[in-house]
Image (cartoon, rainbow, N blue to C red):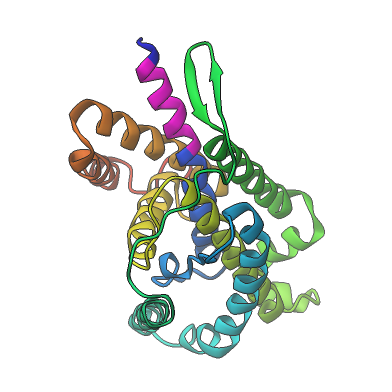
């Protein structure tokens, strides 16, 4: 295996870690409420004039607050209706967020300062940009932290109890509304962090949210809806496949490879990698 190919794979893993974090919020919402959030990609928050690592905590706080507002203002109501109401409601929210960003910030692409996180590491001939390495590591740690929150804490146990049976959880003194609002806050906050970190890999524009939304749905589908470990594995896999495809056959065709894999999974294993048979 050539050094260049190894470098491409490492870069894909770092990108995939950010994909995994971005998709974890979507899979959390699905696992808690069985609702498909079409606005997930458009929740990406980009701060102008500051770097992603300075902006990530602010983005997480702002979007966590937005997540709570969206839950009580929209989601709690549309959950009582049919699936079509959920789809149209979140799709309408996506359009509102997207065009609000167009109106507020414009539609031009932006780039980050080159000296944001300076330097490039050279490990055994493999060159890794410091900014991308930091972004990938932070995304991986936050994703693992989210998994531990759900599986090793009292709050996570309450959220999972609501996901299993909200009526029974309510009889045990757990308030489903509160847990679901917290789930939306966590999902939106994680998305804000991922949106800030993804700026180290891509040019940023309001349309990036739409692209990342599609990536999130593909990642969650491959990993298995409701599974954070599945989102992590699928995110890393998609990151590597995108990078290797761009290297071997050209960046223009990498999406074709990813979506072809997605269709194959839907055909042969619709429950995803970590889903139940």
* Residue 191 vs residue 145, the one in the foreground: 191
Examine the structure image and report whether residue 5 is included in the region drawn in magenta.
yes
Is 271 on the left or on the right of 47, as rendered?
left
Examine the structure image and report whether residue 153 is included in the region drawn in magenta.
no
* Residue 94 vs residue 183, the one in the foreground: 94
Residue 12 x/y as whole percent: 42, 33
Figure check: 233 above or below 249: below
| Image point (48%, 52%), residue name | 112
Q: Which image quadrant is residue 90 in?
A: bottom left
Is 118 on the left or on the right of 221, as rendered?
right
Main secondary structure along the magenta-highlighted residues: helix
* Residue 236 vs residue 183, the one in the foreground: 236
Query: Can you say which quadrant of the picture contains the N terminus?
Result: top left
Residue span colored magenta: 4-14
Figure check: 121 above or below 133: above
Is 191 on the left or on the right of 182, as rendered?
left
Residue 274 x/y as whole percent: 48, 42
| Image point (68%, 71%), residue name | 182
Residue 233 x/y as whole percent: 49, 38
Q: Is residue 255 visible?
A: yes
| Image point (62%, 61%), residue name | 55
| Image point (20%, 34%), residue name | 250
Figure check: 154 above or below 276: below
């Amino acid at each position: 295996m050539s050094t260049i190919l190894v470098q491409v794979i490492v870069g894909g893993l770092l990108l995939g870690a950010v994909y995994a974090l971005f998709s974890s919020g979507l899979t959390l919402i699905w696992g808690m409420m069985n609702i498909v959030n079409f606005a997930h990609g458009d929740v990406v928050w980009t701060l102008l004039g500051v770097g992603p690592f300075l902006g990530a905590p602010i983005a997480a706080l702002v979007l966590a607050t937005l997540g709570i507002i969206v839950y009580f203002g929209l989601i709690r109501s549309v959950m009582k209706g049919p699936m079509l109401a959920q789809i149209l409601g979140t799709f309408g929210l996506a359009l509102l967020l997207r065009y609000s960003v167009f109106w507020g910030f414009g539609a031009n692409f932006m780039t980050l300062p080159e000296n944001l996180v300076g330097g490039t590491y050279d490990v055994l001939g493999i060159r890794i940009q410091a900014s991308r390495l930091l972004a990938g590591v932070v995304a991986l740690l936050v994703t693992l932290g989210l998994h531990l929150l759900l599986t090793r804490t009292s709050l996570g146990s309450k959220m999972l109890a609501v996901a299993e049976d909200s009526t029974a959880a309510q009889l045990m003194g757990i308030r489903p509304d509160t847990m679901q609002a917290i789930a939306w806050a966590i999902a939106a906050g994680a998305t804000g962090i991922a949106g800030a970190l993804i700026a180290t890999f891509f040019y940023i524009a309001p349309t990036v949210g739409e692209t990342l939304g599609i990536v999130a749905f593909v990642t969650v589908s491959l990993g298995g809806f409701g599974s954070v470990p599945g989102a992590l594995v699928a995110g890393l896999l998609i990151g590597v496949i995108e990078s290797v495809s761009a290297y071997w056959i050209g960046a223009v065709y990498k999406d074709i490879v990813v979506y072809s894999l997605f269709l194959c999974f839907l055909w042969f294993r619709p429950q995803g990698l970590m889903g139940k048979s």
